[in-house]
């Protein structure tokens, strides 16, 4: 594309087309309202603007995704350990480590490959064909060939093929929920919208690519194509959204680096000290490798991956599908949930909430005035929705009106037979009303419904007192308009109903004059029944909820108040207000605001980033195309499985299969539970590894030989660590799980005393097992190394039994609360006995049988460790150790 063409394209993209008149738009784009573009001009512009397609996001190749699985620092440590083991001749150790690395890489590769589908789903939203006028002839062309200036014909059922400026709109309504979040189809007109900063939902003279025409027809001029459309801008935002590490990944990365430095330093010192003492180089290399194998938790990546996979499986059974394993853990750190409104907090369907007649507003689920019968009759008769096979078919507003009338005991068939429709004036966006005429056998009755400002101005009295056509002395249009405004401010979509009787069907120009007011009807997309309880649970768990929507501010605030999400307008921020804020001003407001209305996709990302800049972990729920960039940017994106778009689902980390906001609460609980179990495993495995390191370092210092062989160390790390560690992932949640605050994002992996627990218990285990080695050597036992091997194994198994809870004793927990743990310990003990008493395994693992006294001595060492941990729990229960941080304040 030439520089001139690029400049022209950018200028067109920056034009506020909605502020221009139809004539000005035609002039700027060099088009004609009847002839459209010429074929030659269209071809030239196709080269200038490029095809009307969404560009494919930059994708990582499968090879790159695979290589990324080996970029984690812990994985690099394991690679180094495998190389060292191979160099020292321990091929079995090296092969086992390599097998673990391969398994971990395969799982991660499969998960990440799926994340590349988001932009593919966006591309599928483009309309395949469009009706276009060129050279005065109507053509059916691929939507990809549209260019700015093309004249497009629109009709109900079509997907809008590009961003369009409407030139003609006959009862045209477009469902823009995927872009704006509004559940009600938008009424369209051809007049200009003067505000250059009007949100997408307020640009009523525009039609946007990827939205659906639900009613009417129209003619429109293409003003933007491809990546210059609103949908294309979302695609750019989605592509640019930052990928963030999960809390666990961050903590394990920091831990891995520190562990690597420590291991390398210790190994180097041991190796050099041995050489200075005159020890053989090969022996010291074997010692260094043994120490590395002892210190590195080979099973950690595999067990963490398995724990997350099991957690994801359990969450899926509760209707929460995790698209990435790491997101399972992230749930436990969530401090903010930024939720879309439509279909997430609400039911995504309109219903009649209240009516107003004669100065009284009544909820439809409560007592109604006697005069309401006529109003419900008007709602049923002045209506194009129909009842069929127990369901209601029709435009959402009319379907809601019909449902309300039926709920009051009215019968559509009976009433239509009694007062058949004989004529009508259909709804038009310019008139903002519709009128139907019915034969009541005595006279013709006309019912009119529409926007209050369009109907009340045509009335001169009340129907109840003016059905004879006289003037109502109590008529007060000002009071009725004030009530309509008050209902709208309460978040209701307000319709006014009026009527008049005639001797015959009147002429069109007089049919909607001298009307008599019947009443006002307020409709709302009602909150989901379970949403309020879910929000209350989130507050109890220290999680702040906020609503971010493209919907009208009054509607959004009304829903938020009903859900106890917000209390006043001071907690509301509109997209227009946010656009005038810089990042500093937004940062000052972001923790106070609970409702964001009329937001566009870029603003949603700004909100998420502002919260993340304050060290908050943010979940963003949504179901529309407009939510996808924020879903990708959030620490965890949560999309709807039933009503959500493909784009939202592919951009998210978690999909709610039942579209139930309350499901996220159980998912957060699941995330916290999984993280607790992972911490238990880390405590377990690092305690044992620390004991092994101290054992291997201390034995030569006290003049004793290496206490364990490398293959024995690897068996301990993979089997005795791995199997009980895996059983820890099955531990049931603690009772206060959702009464705790979220984990502070600044917390390290070893917060809340975990580091001290690892240090003292690892040191105790090392001292006790070293004592067993000294005793065995002093007694001249040939099987002293087998005693060390057995004592270390038993102390591990005793330790895993008691660390299942930081506070509750083993007697409180019981042995059957985690049956998998009990079976695992039995299995591990059985395998170890096989190593001791099966000759084949004696040869492979260099072990010897133990007599009953030696076996009991090794078991008693494990009992000492268990008693010490139980004593620690007593101090914790008395709040003398490792007190948990108090819950942070969550403003109302």
Image: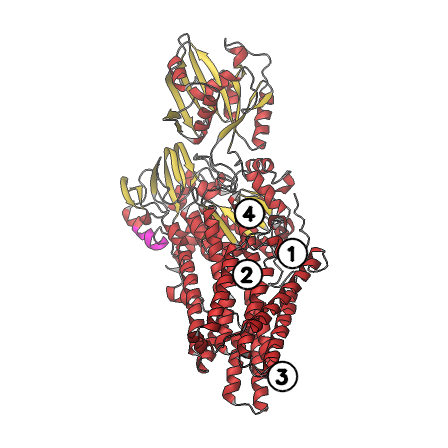
Residue beneath disc 3: 701
**Magenta-colored span:** 43-50
Q: Secondary structure at mark 3?
A: helix
Mark nearer the viewer, 2 or 1: 1
The Cα atoms of the two marked residues, 4 and 3, are separated by: 58 Å
Q: How many marks?
A: 4
> Reading the chain from its start, which is encountered first: label 3 or label 2?
2
- Quadrant (top left, top right, bottom left, bottom right) of the N terminus: bottom left
**Foreground residue among 602 and 192:** 602
Q: Position of residue 288 (x, y in %)?
A: 53, 81
Residue beneath disc 4: 338
Residue beneath disc 1: 807
**Residue farthest to the bottom?**
278
Against 367, is 50 above or below?
below
| Dots 1, 4 in contact, CB < 8 A | no
Q: Main secondary structure of the magenta part?
A: helix
Against 544, is 858 above or below?
below
The Cα atoms of the two marked residues, 2 and 4, are separated by: 22 Å
Q: Quadrant of residue 279?
A: bottom right
């Amino acid at each position: 594309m030439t520089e001139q063409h690029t400049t022209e394209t950018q200028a067109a993209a920056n034009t506020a087309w909605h502020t221009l008149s139809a004539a000005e738009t035609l002039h700027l784009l060099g088009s004609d309202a009847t002839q459209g573009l010429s074929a030659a001009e269209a071809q030239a512009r196709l080269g200038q603007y490029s095809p009307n397609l969404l560009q494919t996001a930059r994708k990582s190749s499968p090879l790159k995704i695979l290589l990324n699985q080996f970029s984690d620092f812990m994985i690099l440590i394991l690679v180094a350990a495998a190389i060292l083991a191979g160099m020292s001749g321990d091929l079995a150790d090296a092969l086992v480590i390599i097998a673990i690395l391969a398994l971990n890489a395969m799982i991660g590769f499969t998960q990440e490959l799926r994340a590349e589908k988001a932009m593919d789903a966006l591309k599928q939203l483009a309309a395949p064909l469009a009706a276009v006028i060129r050279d005065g002839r109507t053509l059916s062309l691929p939507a990809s060939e549209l260019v700015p200036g093309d004249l497009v014909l629109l009709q109900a059922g079509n997907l809008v093929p590009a961003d369009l400026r409407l030139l003609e709109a006959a009862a045209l309504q477009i469902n823009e929920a995927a872009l704006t979040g509004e559940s009600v189809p938008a009424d369209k007109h051809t007049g200009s919208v003067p505000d250059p900063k009007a949100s997408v939902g307020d640009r009523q003279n525009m039609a946007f690519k990827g939205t659906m025409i639900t009613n009417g027809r129209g003619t429109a001029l293409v003003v933007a194509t491809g990546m210059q459309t609103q949908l294309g801008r979302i695609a750019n935002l989605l592509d640019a959204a930052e990928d963030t590490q999960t809390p666990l990944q961050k903590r394990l990365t920091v831990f891995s680096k520190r562990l690597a430095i420590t291991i390398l330093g210790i190994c180097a010192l041991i190796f050099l000290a041995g050489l200075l003492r005159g020890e053989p180089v090969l022996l010291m290399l074997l010692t260094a490798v043994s120490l590395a194998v002892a210190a590195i938790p080979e099973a950690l990546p595999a067990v963490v991956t398995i724990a997350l996979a099991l957690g994801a499986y359990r969450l899926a059974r509760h209707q929460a599908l995790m698209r990435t394993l790491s997101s399972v853990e992230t749930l436990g750190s969530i401090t903010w949930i930024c939720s879309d409104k439509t279909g997430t907090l609400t039911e995504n369907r309109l219903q009649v909430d209240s009516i107003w007649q004669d100065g009284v507003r009544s909820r439809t689920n409560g007592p109604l005035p006697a005069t309401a019968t006529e109003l419900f009759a008007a709602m049923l008769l002045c209506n194009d929705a129909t009842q069929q096979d127990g369901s209601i078919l029709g435009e959402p507003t009319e379907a809601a009106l019909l449902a309300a009338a039926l709920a009051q005991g009215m019968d559509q068939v009976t009433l239509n037979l009694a007062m058949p429709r004989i004529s009508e004036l259909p709804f038009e966006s310019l008139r903002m009303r519709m009128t139907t005429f019915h034969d009541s056998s005595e006279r013709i009755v006309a019912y009119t419904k529409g926007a209050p400002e369009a109907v009340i101005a045509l009335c001169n009295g009340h129907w109840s007192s003016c059905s004879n056509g006289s003037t109502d002395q109590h008529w007060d249009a000002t009071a009725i308009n004030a009530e309509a405004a008050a209902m709208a401010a309460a978040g209701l979509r307000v319709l006014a109903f009026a009527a008049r009787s005639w001797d015959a069907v009147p002429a069109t120009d007089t049919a909607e004059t001298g009307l008599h007011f019947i009443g006002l009807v307020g409709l709302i997309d009602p909150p989901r029944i379970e949403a309020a309880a879910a929000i209350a649970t989130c507050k109890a768990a220290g999680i702040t909820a906020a609503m971010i929507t493209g919907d009208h501010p009054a509607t959004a605030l009304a829903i938020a108040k009903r859900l106890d999400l917000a209390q006043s307008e001071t907690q509301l921020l509109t997209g227009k207000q946010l656009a005038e804020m810089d990042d500093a001003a937004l940062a000052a407001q972001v923790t106070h605001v609970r409702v964001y209305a009329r937001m566009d996709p870029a603003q949603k990302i700004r909100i998420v980033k502002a919260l993340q800049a304050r060290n908050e972990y943010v979940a963003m729920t949504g179901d529309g195309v407009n939510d996808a960039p924020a879903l990708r940017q959030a620490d965890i994106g949560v999309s709807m499985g039933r009503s959500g778009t493909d784009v939202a689902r592919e951009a998210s980390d978690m999909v709610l299969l039942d579209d139930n906001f309350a499901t996220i609460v159980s998912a957060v609980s699941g995330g916290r539970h999984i993280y607790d179990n992972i911490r238990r495993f880390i405590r377990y495995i690092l305690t044992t590894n620390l004991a092994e390191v101290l054992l291997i370092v201390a034995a030569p210092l006290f003049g004793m030989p290496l206490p364990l062989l490398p293959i024995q160390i690897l068996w301990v790390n993979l089997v005795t660590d791995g199997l009980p560690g895996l059983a820890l992932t099955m531990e049931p949640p603690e009772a206060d799980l959702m009464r705790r605050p979220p984990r502070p994002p600044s917390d390290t992996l070893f917060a809340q005393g975990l580091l001290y627990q690892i240090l003292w218990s690892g040191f105790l285990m090392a001292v006790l097992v070293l004592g067993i080695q000294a005793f065995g050597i002093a007694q001249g036992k040939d099987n002293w190394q087998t005693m060390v091997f057995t004592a270390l194994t038993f102390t591990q198994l005793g330790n895993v039994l008691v660390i299942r809870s930081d506070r509750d004793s083993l007697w409180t927990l019981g042995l059957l609360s985690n049956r998998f743990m009990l079976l695992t310990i039995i299995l591990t003990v059985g395998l170890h006995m096989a190593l001791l008493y099966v000759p084949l395994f004696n040869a492979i693992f260099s072990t010897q049988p133990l007599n009953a006294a030696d076996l009991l001595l090794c078991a008693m060492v494990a009992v000492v460790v268990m008693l010490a941990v139980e004593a620690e729990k007593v101090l914790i229960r008395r709040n003398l150790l490792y007190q948990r941080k108090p819950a942070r304040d969550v403003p109302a």
